[in-house]
């Protein structure tokens, strides 16, 4: 079977687009060929800055001939129906067949679609691919209409087998397919002819082009690490930069240079970021001091002076870049030493966080209040947590973060130490954004944890308060990530905290920032107190009653009149508040489900646990879910659940039929058989053991006690008929089923389990 080789040769393709382009070319070509009836064995795509390449092995030589039969209208059908059928098939009346059917003769069309040769199909699919290729950005050049990411110079399209190679006949806007390509732009620019992929790859390598991007990455990493090792230094790993640089060169040549002494005092992250962002340099550090002392740049060619001229030019540009970084660093240090982080962050009062939530300064004050509230629960000093929260975002106003936004938080930690603040505050500056993703480390320092939780809870409650929630795949404010961050902070540190209480506090603060209800009532803390009351036993009625009481505390007639006018608005606001709070808790639970499913816990197990009291204690929820999940993986667990469901189904049907609730009064004296009496004894023992185990959160013991019920329940259902003729015995047995349900439901809502 033939081999297909395609190369699209152009000006430099941006490195960030190359992986996408490789995958897209492979998918569009293979999908198109398969749709047209061809088959292939294996497809592989490659890219360099100047070419996209696809090779297919085992391509079929032609598409198969297809034969299709279509049933048409009856022979006696109206002429219009027959003509419509003829148009749909492209046949004439004479070409139709008449066949007997249940209701008489009908027309049949037999359509044969002859196969096509592979070159014809390849040309058609490749032209369609090139003309419709979905580049993120594309351009036109010259007088043609063709659009490509950069000007397209040539197309190599070759079908080869044991008998030789042939060029596919293709012409796109004057660019004719051929069997030639060019080597490295500088070291081997001449064009040459190829006869197949093996020949193509070998000649490219001889022409100083490394076709495989992964091979270029390996070459860069090997050469760069060897250069650093030779001087007793280490290359700083940067996989993203490695992939990007491999997309910038066709023949990588690693060159190493030293950073001038004037810049070595800069924080290593500043040097690394500046060199990576502006110059695409790898950083080289001294393993003894941790300082960044050198760099590795990757040239696209070999030179007679072994890269000396290239290094000289790079050093000149690097010196200018690092001079800027040094200026930012020294400027920020002067501000910190004269005004402190508080002074540096003073300008945040004029920076809008969100037009409905006020300034960054207002947000920081909310976070500080929440961090102080959370601090005792995580073992942090409240004063330190509040102080940290007030300064952790000050570096947003620094010159360095203005130039390199990715250094926010990290620079704050440097400036905090320069000011002489505690190490706890410095760590909070750096760590309060964490965890940023599922693989990011979870901070454990108490002050950092308090501020990180407060930051994320304020983000969630703030956007919930203004009804800016994630919808479908849209999450512009990264609220799902914030919720997952809260979950990982709580679980990663084993925290026992009432998430409901703190989301409530955050939501109250956010509503106060909006000045909803509170501003119109002009009553200090009235809305906050009413919002708390709305969650209690009295619910909304209690909240409104409290607002009325607040009204009576005011002596001013003008204020009382304003309160009377605002009470309908207050009720509406409180109802909206309560709905948002409940919706936010549901959002937390949804994120927890996603997190636990990734940990291997079934969704129905999570639902069963979340239906229990205390579902706002995330650590408790996880402990219960893990214990229930482990229990269900045992034979006793599976069988017990079936026994519970049988008991629950019988009981539910009986209660619906009789119109009563069987939940009290099961007495062993009405038991008629030993299996029945044994179940009473087993339930008594389980009840006595489960209560203390659940109280002490010893869920493993609780599940073990539950497992002991499996055999007595199985024996009970085998030995007795629940709906006995004697009404007293029937009622007693139904009440006994109720005891089974109550005891089993004390560990989780087992009705939520599947199966």
Image: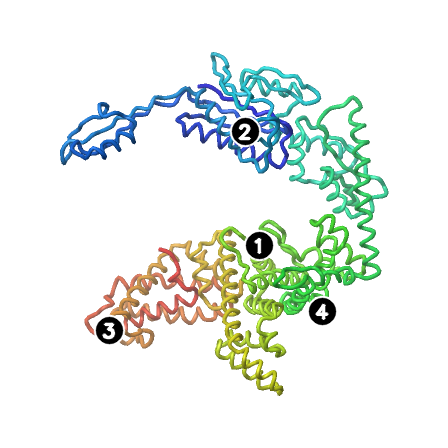
Above or below: residue 300 compared with residue 1: below
Ranked by sequence position, the earlier of labels 2 and 1 is 2
Specify whether 84 is left or right of 490. Answer: left
- What colouring does the structure picture have? rainbow
Q: Which residue is mark 3?
A: 729
Q: Which residue is mark 1?
A: 481
Q: Looking at the figure, which quarter contains the C terminus? A: bottom left
Label 2, residues with CA under 10 Å away: few <14, some 14-19, many ≥20: many
Above or below: residue 434 compared with residue 534: above
How far across and how far down the image is residue 495, in percent? 59, 63
Mark 2 to mark 1 CA distance (whole Å): 34 Å
Mark 4 to mark 2 CA distance (whole Å): 59 Å
Tag 2, which secondary structure?
strand
Ranked by sequence position, the earlier of labels 3 and 1 is 1
Tag 1, which secondary structure?
helix
Name of the residue lying farthest toward the right: 262
Q: Which residue is mark 4?
A: 383
Quarter-of-image position of residue 58: top left
How far across and how far down the image is residue 254, in percent? 73, 30
Is 64 in front, or is 59? 64
How far across and how far down the image is residue 474, in percent? 53, 52
In percent of the image, x 42 and y 22: which residue is there? 60
Above or below: residue 369 compared with residue 218: below
Q: Which residue is mark 2?
A: 45
Tag 3, which secondary structure?
helix
Above or below: residue 542 compared with residue 104: below
Q: Looking at the figure, which quarter contains the N terminus? A: top left
Quarter-of-image position of residue 520: bottom right
Ranked by sequence position, the earlier of labels 4 and 3 is 4
Quarter-of-image position of residue 457: bottom right
């Amino acid at each position: 079977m033939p081999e297909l080789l395609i190369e699209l040769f152009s000006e430099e393709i941006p490195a960030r687009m190359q992986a996408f382009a490789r995958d897209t070319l492979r998918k569009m070509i293979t999908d198109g060929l398969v749709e047209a009836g061809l088959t292939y064995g294996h497809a592989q795509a490659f890219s360099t800055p100047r070419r996209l390449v696809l090779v297919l092995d085992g391509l079929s030589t032609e598409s198969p001939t297809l034969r299709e039969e279509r049933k048409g209208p009856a022979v006696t059908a109206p002429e219009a129906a027959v003509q419509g059928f003829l148009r749909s098939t492209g046949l004439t009346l004479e070409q139709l067949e008449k066949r007997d059917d249940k209701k008489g003769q009908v027309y049949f069309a037999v359509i044969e679609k002859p196969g096509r040769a592979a070159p014809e199909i390849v040309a058609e699919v490749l032209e369609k691919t090139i003309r419709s290729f979905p580049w993120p950005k594309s351009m036109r050049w010259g007088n043609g209409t063709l659009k490509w990411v950069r000007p397209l110079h040539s197309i190599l399209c070759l079908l080869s087998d044991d008998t030789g190679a042939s060029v596919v006949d293709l012409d796109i806007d004057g660019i004719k397919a051929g069997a030639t390509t060019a080597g490295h732009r500088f070291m081997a620019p001449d064009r040459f002819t190829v006869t197949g992929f093996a020949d193509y790859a070998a000649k490219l390598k001889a022409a100083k082009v490394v076709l495989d991007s992964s091979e270029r990455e390996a070459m860069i990493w090997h050469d760069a690490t060897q250069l650093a090792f030779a001087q007793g230094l280490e290359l700083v790993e940067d996989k993203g930069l490695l992939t990007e640089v491999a997309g910038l060169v066709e023949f990588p040549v690693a060159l190493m240079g030293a950073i001038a002494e004037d810049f070595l005092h800069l924080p290593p992250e500043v040097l690394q970021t500046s060199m990576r962002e502006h110059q695409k340099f790898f950083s080289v550090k001294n393993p003894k001091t941790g300082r960044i002392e050198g760099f590795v740049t990757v040239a696209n060619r070999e030179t007679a002076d072994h890269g000396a001229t290239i290094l000289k030019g790079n050093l000149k540009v690097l010196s200018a870049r690092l001079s800027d970084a040094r200026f930012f660093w020294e400027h920020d240090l002067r501000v910190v030493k004269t005004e402190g982080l508080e002074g540096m962050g003073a300008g945040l009062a004029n920076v809008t966080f969100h037009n409905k939530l006020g300034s960054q300064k207002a947000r920081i004050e909310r976070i500080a209040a929440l961090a102080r509230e959370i601090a005792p629960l995580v073992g942090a000093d409240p004063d330190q947590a509040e102080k940290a929260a007030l300064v952790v975002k000050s570096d947003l106003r620094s010159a360095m973060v203005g130039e390199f936004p990715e250094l926010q938080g990290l620079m704050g930690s440097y400036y905090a130490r320069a000011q002489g603040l505690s190490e706890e505050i410095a760590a909070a500056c750096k760590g309060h954004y964490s965890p940023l993703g599922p693989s990011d480390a979870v901070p454990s320092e108490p002050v950092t944890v308090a501020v990180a939780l407060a930051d994320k809870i304020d983000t969630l409650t703030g956007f919930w308060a203004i009804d800016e929630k994630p919808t479908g795949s849209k999450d512009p404010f990264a609220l799902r990530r914030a919720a997952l961050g809260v979950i990982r902070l709580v679980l990663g540190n084993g925290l026992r905290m009432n998430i409901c209480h703190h989301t409530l506090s955050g939501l109250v603060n956010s509503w106060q920032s909006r000045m909803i209800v509170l501003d119109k009532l002009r009553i200090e803390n009235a809305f906050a107190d009413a919002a708390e009351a709305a969650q209690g036993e009295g619910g909304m009625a209690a909240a409104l009653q409290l607002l009325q009481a607040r009204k009576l505390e005011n002596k001013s007639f003008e204020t009382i009149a304003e309160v009377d006018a605002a009470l309908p608005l207050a009720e509406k606001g409180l109802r909206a508040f309560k709905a948002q709070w409940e919706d936010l808790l549901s959002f937390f639970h949804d994120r927890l489900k996603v997190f636990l499913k990734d940990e291997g816990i079934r969704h129905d197990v999570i639902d069963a646990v979340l239906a229990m009291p205390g579902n706002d204690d995330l650590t408790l929820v996880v402990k219960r879910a893990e214990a229930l999940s482990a229990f269900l993986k045992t034979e006793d667990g599976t069988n017990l659940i079936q026994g519970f469901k049988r008991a629950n189904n019988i009981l539910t049907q009986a209660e619906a039929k009789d119109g009563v609730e069987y939940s009290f009064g099961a007495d062993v004296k009405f038991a008629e058989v030993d299996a029945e009496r044994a179940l009473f004894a087993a339930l008594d023992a389980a009840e006595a053991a489960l209560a203390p185990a659940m109280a002490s959160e010893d869920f493993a013991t609780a599940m073990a006690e539950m497992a002991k019920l499996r055999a007595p329940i199985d024996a009970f259902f085998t030995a007795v008929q629940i709906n006995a003729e004697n009404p007293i015995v029937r009622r007693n047995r139904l009440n006994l089923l109720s005891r089974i349900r109550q005891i089993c439901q004390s560990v989780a809502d087992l009705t939520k389990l599947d199966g």
